[in-house]
Amino acid sequence: MSARKFQRLALVAAVFLASYVFLTRTDLVYVYQGQTWRALKYVPSSFDWSSRPWTHPMDDEANMVGLPEGNQQQLPRIQHQFSPDELTRSHNETQRKRRDAVMHAARRSWRAYREHAWGRDEVSPQTLVGVDPFAGWGATLVDSLDTLWIMGMKRDFADAVRHVATIDWDNATDWHCSLFETNIRYLGGLLSAFDLSGERVLLDKAVELGDMLYAGFDTPNHMPANRFHFQSAKEGRLEPSGHEASAAVGSLSLEFTRLSQLSGDPKYYRAIDGVKRELVRTQDETSLPGMWPIFIDLQNRFFAPGTSFSLGASADSAYEYLSKMHALLGGRDPAYGQLHTKAMATAARHILFRPMLPPSGDPASPSPPPDVLFPGTVLSNGRIVELTPEVQHLGCFAGGMFALGGRLFGNEEHVGLGEQLARGCAWAYAAFPTGVMPELAEMIPCESKDKGKIGPNDGPPPPCAWNETLWLEKLARAGSDPDSNLDSNPDSALTADQPPPLPRGFAALRSPEYLLRPEAIESVFVLYRITGRTEWLDAAWEMFESIRKATRTKHAYSAIEDVRATGVTGKRDSMESFWIAETLKYFYLIFSEPELISLDDYVFNTEAHPFRLPKPGRSEEVN
């Protein structure tokens, strides 16, 4: 065969292949490292939410906004600038072995799901049956997409994408879903996986789902209806709740904004911008100015008369998203930075507390306790502010939030607060027999209001001497509470030379379980990436080892009943999708090279899905 004839045949073959891959919408070929898998078959959902007429159209001038325009700000560097020597010391064979151990746990968890619950929301890790608490669209599958990609499990990723291409959002296992959970797990998972892989079918399915969730704003005042009743939504009869979690209404912004950036359709951003305007309007009018109560009345526009404030359950991600929206928009909307700055100032003053801790180390020559903080819960009527020193695992994300915001807005004091918060949760893990922190406990706050600082010129924190008598009194008081999970006479165990009912420092235990949650390792990961301090690597490994030992089942990992267990832990036969999506992802990333999903290139949603940050001169819209 002549060279010219060979070239002509090669050209024909190339044109045919390009036509097959790029022009045939429903027949896509997935190729990775020279391997080709069977074609993807994109199957549109059976109901087209984009064509549904609105009962309450967003056609007034105030709602006709688009993505902010203008010059993008040059955001400050977030990650520590690791020197070659630091990288050599911090990412050596030890870290690679740790990373591989995390990956083994992820493969083990994914295998259990794949073999026993494929396409279901979750696998029960002991009984190995599929369950569907999130409408049955495959929550673990979609939530795990970016983890599979990041860990290099590309064949598993390709198989999962093939399944995603056939999801019918109109075929649910229930008559309603949570707008919040569907947004952070499903929509966030699809957008992140698209940002990482560029696989177009993921964006197509994200647009389908986004159109459905967008209908949640078709309410009389355009506030979102978190209880998304499918038939009512189709008929335009949704109503927002008069008692809605602030996290549910405040944690749609990242996903809706990223969807607008990628699709070029501003309607999703337009919806969440209305929520932002209400946050701005009410921030200084609550009974704890700067923050919003845990629950909001959305039926009456955006009414916030509540008196309970927290960074924990039902409130957490509403605050988390403020600084992250500033980053995702490239600083083009100053409102998010202002909202974050005010909220964190209030939280630092009223929500964070220093706990009374016992000296650590050898009792004969004890060393001072670690300098830590925790976020509590506050009751405020506008005049009196009362702290409840409860410690929630969900609140452990706050360390990362303070540190990230501190670096983003040039507030090194808040980076220091973030370190104290992250160190607090790491300490709480180590305090319990399993090496794992409980879902909800209480501590004793120090009398000093000074939170202390971390920095080269800062002195030690104010004294807060350990008071054994006070601790025993608190334990005795808690023991009389039937919900405390303590013996009614807790100090009897001490007088009988038995271990104390709780580790010293903890005054009550409200929920002793561990649910495979990610918030503590999330903050440890963020603090490592921001500070570069290797202490966080060792803290993360101790946490991972303890979690793995306490939660391991024959085939996967399970939530446990009680972190006080000294032998085999009682299992709850539950492995939520965030175990692979968040917990294992953060563990994997902290032991990986710092440039893998750099905090200067990506922003994580509250389900640990990384969205690519827009850069000056780079178009985000996908044609």
Image (spheres, rainbow, N blue to C red):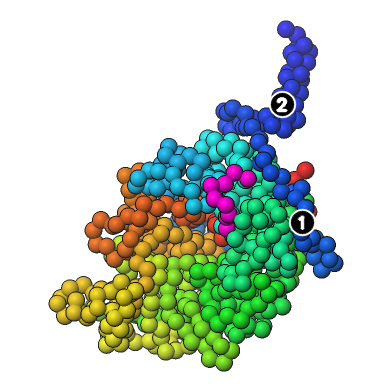
Q: Nearer the viewer, residue 234 or 184?
A: 234
The amino acid type of the residue labelled 2 equals: Tyr
- Left or right of 272 in this view: 106: left
Query: Residue 408, located in which quarter of the rendered image?
Result: bottom right
Quadrant where the C terminus lies?
A: top right
The stretch in magenta equals 170-180
In-front residue for pair 88/211? 211
**CB under 8 Å between discs 1 and 2:** no
The residue under label 1 is 54
Compare residues 620 and 86 and report the one nearer the observer. Answer: 620
Q: Is residue 422 above or below residue 376?
A: above
Q: Does 545 appear in magenta?
A: no
Figure disc tally: 2
Residue 444 appears left or right of 72: left
Residue type at tag 1: Trp
Nearer the observer, disc 1 or disc 2?
1
Name the residue: 66% across, 71% down: 299
Q: CA distance from mark 1 to mark 2?
A: 38 Å
Q: Secondary structure under badge 2?
A: helix
Report the residue marked by disc 2: 20
Residue 220 horizontal/vertical position (percent): 73, 66
Q: Residue at x 37, y 66 (%)?
A: 437
Q: Position of residue 357 (x, y in %)?
A: 35, 80
